[in-house]
Image (cartoon, rainbow, N blue to C red):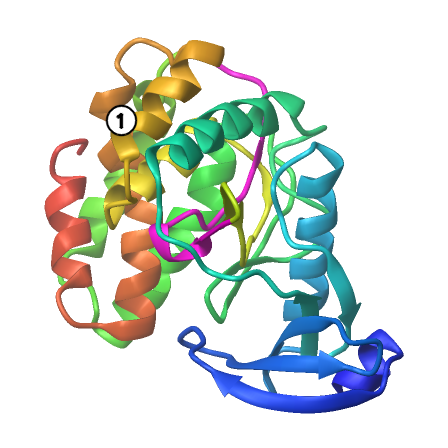
Amino acid sequence: MVAVACDRRVVEVTAVAGGDICRAWKVRLDDGSVAFAKTFGGDPSLFDAEAQSLAWLAAAGAPVPAVLGVGSEVLVLRWLESATPSAPAAERLGRELAALHGAGADRFGAPWPGYAGRLRLANGPAPSWAEFFAATRLLPLVRRGADTGALRDPALLERVAERLGALTGPDEPPARLHGDLWSGNLLWSAGHAWLVDPAAYGGHRETDLAMLELFGAPHLDRIVTAYTEVTPLADGWRDRIGLHQLYPLLAHAVMFGGGYGARAEAMARRYA
């Protein structure tokens, strides 16, 4: 699969630690270069959407790995050696995220499918972020969570979705988002925090920052300070962090169960 996707002969393949849904490999190619490959036998659109996301982020100058090849069951990227997170790299990331978000999008959503892990979501356009967030993120995941039993009080989250227009703060134009920016999707290497595994779309810039907060990114205070030095955040943004975090919490509830549904419902009570 790798050889076909990147049109190179594969010399050596070594399994490496990967994510929750894909298998991951370190691959040496016949020209001496090293690549990272991940494979998945499920939704054939998953890697195409990720490759398009990476290209869209790269067009705005974001620190993303180069795509070497893509197929229905494999994505091949430039290999990046991991390093220890550092404060200077975090500050650089804050400035780069501000520039990425500022590059904007022509709509809320994207022309490729949305994904939360293995969950496929709509990315269809909406006239406002509140309408997009409710229709394509919150309500579909609430329905899935109710069907699987991951949520005990789906009506609570439906009330939040209905009230989004009054909760989201000042109107902002669509920002160019990574879309799944938890700390595990930062790869620290060579003075950068590289953005990996994106599910990019036009959305609200506070969403990326809220997701970094959810699972605790290294040097988060440095990231946010550097970000706001480039582009200040709207008043009240800290009070809205939990609102944006409802989406990843619901996605985790649907995929993994456990206590994520209860966490989502506890968060929703702040806004219902």
Residue 116 horizontal side relative to residue 55, left or right: left
- Give the vertical position of 248 relative to 132 (above or below): below
- The residue depicted at 82 percent of the width and 78 percent of the height is 5
| Residue 106 visible in the snapshot | yes
- Give the vertical position of 134 relative to 112 (above or below): above
Q: Kindly identify which residue carries mark 1.
A: 240
Residue 110 image position (x, y, % from top left): 67, 44
| Residue 39 visible in the snapshot | no
Res 10 quadrant in image: bottom right
Mark 1 belongs to which amino acid?
Arg
Residue 98 image position (x, y, % from top left): 52, 23
Which residue occupies the foreground of this view, 81 or 73? 81
Element under disc 1: helix
Residue 87 horizontal side relative to residue 126, left or right: left
Residue 25 image position (x, y, % from top left): 57, 82
- The residue depicted at 41 percent of the width and 27 percent of the height is 91
Q: Spot the residue most to the front.
A: 32
Res 227 quadrant in image: top left
- Give the vertical position of 128 relative to 197 (above or below): above
Which corner quadrant holds the C terminus?
top left
Magenta residues (range):
171-189
